[in-house]
Image (cartoon, rainbow, N blue to C red):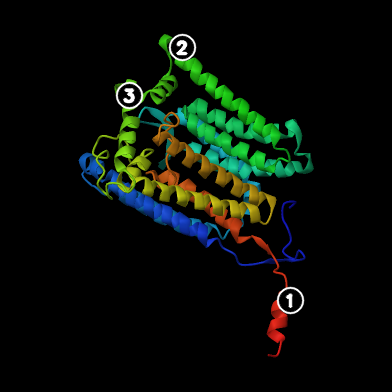
């Protein structure tokens, strides 16, 4: 295969490397998430379901099983996905389309789930599909991957899944993440930088114009997305029409102070903040553990991103490097979007906080990505250390 390197390259040595640092931060984030999930959801679970540990027990079992599965799956050679990427992409495309059939499930007014033995969001598979397939398309182009036309092929593959996700599930935030993963992988692999910076600037101006136009024309009507933008701009004015959740989240953030009220002492989780265990769990973290707790969470995610960067930088081949880059992009965007919503920096999106928010299928696909990253780390090839001449002289000198 064109993307493989031989172990016997001069000056390099293959070691039995495993990124225990990445595994450690996965376990830390998952464990912290379980503690915060119980603290956040116990009241609502007791009131609604009669079991204060309902959400905790389900998440704990799923997390334990899939951490073990991720470690086991990391022993498999990730290069096998070179051949399976197109099939995973096709499966994601078909499964998203099935959402509009009787197999689709509607929850909280949104039809985004499928029930095929288990209930899951097929858009999660789409994220994994672009992480696996886009690098294949880029590598197959080889030296021809330059210029605008070359970028169109992998970008079109990612855009197609993103567009389908938006049209069928009306999930704009997930569609944005799928497109974002695609764009980051292409950006890292492409030899030129300035066209991407220019495109990002154009996109930012476009978003600003859309917000201004929607705000100006809202008097003549608008959909729920337009209302979300207005709620974001002035949540107090729309307190009874979509602004309640973000206001309560901001109350939680403000009342926590620097060190928080103490674990378990949140007031907003007592029925004031809807679905606190999902996309708004970071606000409860800051209420109970304060700004200090929020900084610790951000630091843990930052360290996870650093380990993914390390794996991408030192991967055995370009395929492994681009896979790790795609995982990096996914975690980065999801964390930034979730925290930005909680602090009202952007309109609400429904994006969860990885490893901490409640959601079994989210944990399953996140662990699949972590298994991929660990698999790439197992095949890292290090440079052979140079001979320590001065050390040999001192050691052999007879004092």
Local SS, label 3: helix
Looking at the image, is mark 1 or mark 3 nearer the viewer? 1
The local crowd at label 1, few if under 14, some if 14 to 19, many if 20 or more residues have their Cα within 10 Å, is: few
Q: Position of residue 83 (x, y in %)?
A: 65, 47
Q: Position of residue 145 (x, y in %)?
A: 75, 39
Name which of mark 2 and mark 3 comes first in the sequence: 2
Name which of mark 1 and mark 2 comes first in the sequence: 2
Decide: is 310 above or below 45.
below
Q: Write the residue at 53% across / 32% down.
A: 176
Q: Quadrant of residue 199?
A: top right
Local SS, label 2: helix
Is disc 2 in contact with disc 3, using a CB cutoff of under 8 Å? Answer: no
Q: Write the residue at 62% across / 28% down.
A: 201
Inter-mark Cα distance, 1 to 2 = 74 Å
Q: Which residue is mark 1?
A: 389
The local crowd at label 3, few if under 14, some if 14 to 19, many if 20 or more residues have their Cα within 10 Å, is: some
Decide: is 298 above or below 239.
below
Mark carried by residue 217: 2
Q: Which residue is mark 3?
A: 236
Q: Quadrant of residue 89?
A: top right
Hey, which residue is sitting farthest bottom in the picture?
398
Inter-mark Cα distance, 1 to 3 = 70 Å
Q: Which of 62/151 is in front?
A: 151
Q: Is residue 276 left or right of residue 270?
A: right
Q: Position of residue 257 (x, y in %)?
A: 32, 43
Q: Which quarter of the image is occupied by the C terminus?
A: bottom right
Q: Write the residue at 33% across / 20% down.
A: 237
Local SS, label 1: helix
């Amino acid at each position: 295969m064109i993307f493989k390197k031989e172990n016997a390259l001069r000056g390099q040595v293959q070691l039995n490397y495993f990124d225990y640092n990445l595994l450690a931060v996965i376990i830390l984030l998952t464990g912290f998430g379980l503690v915060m999930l119980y603290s956040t959801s116990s009241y609502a679970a007791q009131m609604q379901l009669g079991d204060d540990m309902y959400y905790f027990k389900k998440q704990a079992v799923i997390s334990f099983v899939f951490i073990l599965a991720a470690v086991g799956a990391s022993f498999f050679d990730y290069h096998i996905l070179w051949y399976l990427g197109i099939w995973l992409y096709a499966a994601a495309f078909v499964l998203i389309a099935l959402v509009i059939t009787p197999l689709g499930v509607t929850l909280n007014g949104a039809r985004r789930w499928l029930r095929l033995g288990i209930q899951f969001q097929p858009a999660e598979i789409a994220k994994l599909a672009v992480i696996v397939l886009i690098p294949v398309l880029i590598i197959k182009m080889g030296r021809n991957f330059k210029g605008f036309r070359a970028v169109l092929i992998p970008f079109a593959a990612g855009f197609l899944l993103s567009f389908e996700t938006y049209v069928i599930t009306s999930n704009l935030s997930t569609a944005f993440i799928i497109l974002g993963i695609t764009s980051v992988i292409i950006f890292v692999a492409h030899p030129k930088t300035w066209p991407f910076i220019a495109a990002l600037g154009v996109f930012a101006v476009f978003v600003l114009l859309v917000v201004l136009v929607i705000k100006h024309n809202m008097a003549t009507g608008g959909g729920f997305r337009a209302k979300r933008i207005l709620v974001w701009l002035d949540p107090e004015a729309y307190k009874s029409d979509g602004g309640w959740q973000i206001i309560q989240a901001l109350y939680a953030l403000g009342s926590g102070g620097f060190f928080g009220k103490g674990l378990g002492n949140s007031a907003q989780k007592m029925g004031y903040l809807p679905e606190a265990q999902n996309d708004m769990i970071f606000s409860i973290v800051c209420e109970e553990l304060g700004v200090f707790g929020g900084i610790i969470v951000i630091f843990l995610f930052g360290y996870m991103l650093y380990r993914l960067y390390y794996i991408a930088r030192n991967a055995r081949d370009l395929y492994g490097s681009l896979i790790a880059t795609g995982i990096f992009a996914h975690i980065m965007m999801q964390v930034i979007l979730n925290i930005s919503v909680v602090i009202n920096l952007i309109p609400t999106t429904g994006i969860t906080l990885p490893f901490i928010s409640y959601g079994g299928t989210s944990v399953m696909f996140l662990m699949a990505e972590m298994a991929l990253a660990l698999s790439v780390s197992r095949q890292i090839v290090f440079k052979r250390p140079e001979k320590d001449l001065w050390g040999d002289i001192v050691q052999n000198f007879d004092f």
